[in-house]
Image (cartoon, rainbow, N blue to C red):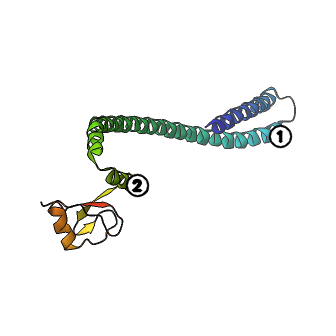
Amino acid sequence: IDANKARQRELNREVESYEARRRSATRILENGTGDAAAAERQLASVAEVLDTLETELLEKMEALEELESERTQAAADAADAAAFLEAEKAGHDGKIAALKAKFTAILPEREATLALLDKTILGRYETLLSRRGRAIAEIVDGSCSGCQRVVRQQNIADLQRGLMYACDGCGRWLLPPDPG
């Protein structure tokens, strides 16, 4: 846009210069002083150059209008995108705050439950948690959800009776499949 405006100013200066030449040649013809043939040639040459310059000037003005329109549209699009981003961030901030509150609320219950565990089991739980990210896996469609290894039916039956069992593949403790 700036380059277009600069070229427009340059074209306006050139047009003014050629307009001055045309006025000078016209005065020569009107006053009858100087070379009339040269003045006519200069008028023809100036008219041709002015036509070219004015055409280019009009093209630059049209291009500038189009660029201004595109810039306005881009600014509106950017404002819309920024508003959408802020709305999304606000929504996610609310979700994060709710999850943090929920986590904070269940933390005392977790601590109380961990205090009831045997030290050996607690140590194994913490080791699994630190190495694998999760210490417990659910059985889904007969497989461990942690490593996808198939769990024997006898072990699933033991889990459903309340026994603890660890996956042969990943070592995570298994939760029985959901009866529903």
Q: Which mark is residue 37?
A: 1
User: Which label's residue is closer to the chain start, 2 or 1?
Assistant: 1
Q: Is residue 13 above or below residue 125?
A: above
Q: Residue at x 68, y 35 (%)?
A: 6
Q: Quadrant of the N terminus?
A: top right
Determine which quarter of the picture holds residue 98: top left
Residue 54, given in percent of the width and then of the height, sits at 65, 39
Residue at horizontal 66%, vertical 38%?
3
Residue furthest front in the image:
119
Q: Residue 11 in the image: state x and y as whole percent.
A: 69, 36
Estimate how packed mark 2 is, as few (under 14), some (14 to 19) or many (20 or more) residues with alpha carbons within 10 Å: some
- Comparing marks 2 and 1, which lies closer to the viewer? 2
Task: Identify which residue, 87 or 60, lies in the foreground.
Answer: 87
Q: How would you rate the neighbour count of disc 1 (Cα within 10 Å): few for under 14, some for 14-19, many for 20 or more?
A: few
Q: Dot 1 lies on which element?
A: helix
Residue wearing tag 2:
127
Return the x and y of residue 55 as percentages of the image width and height. 63, 42
Q: Is residue 80 above or below residue 162?
A: above
Foreground residue among 118 and 173: 118
**Residue displayed at 34% across by 54% down:** 120
Left/right of residue 169 with respect to residue 16 in the rendered view:
left
CA gap, disc 2 and disc 1? 104 Å
Indicate the position of residue 53 as horizontal and vertical percent values: 68, 40
Residue type at mark 1?
Ala
In the image shown, does 76 or 104 lie closer to the viewer?
104
Is 166 rendered above or below residue 77? below
Residue 133: image tag: none
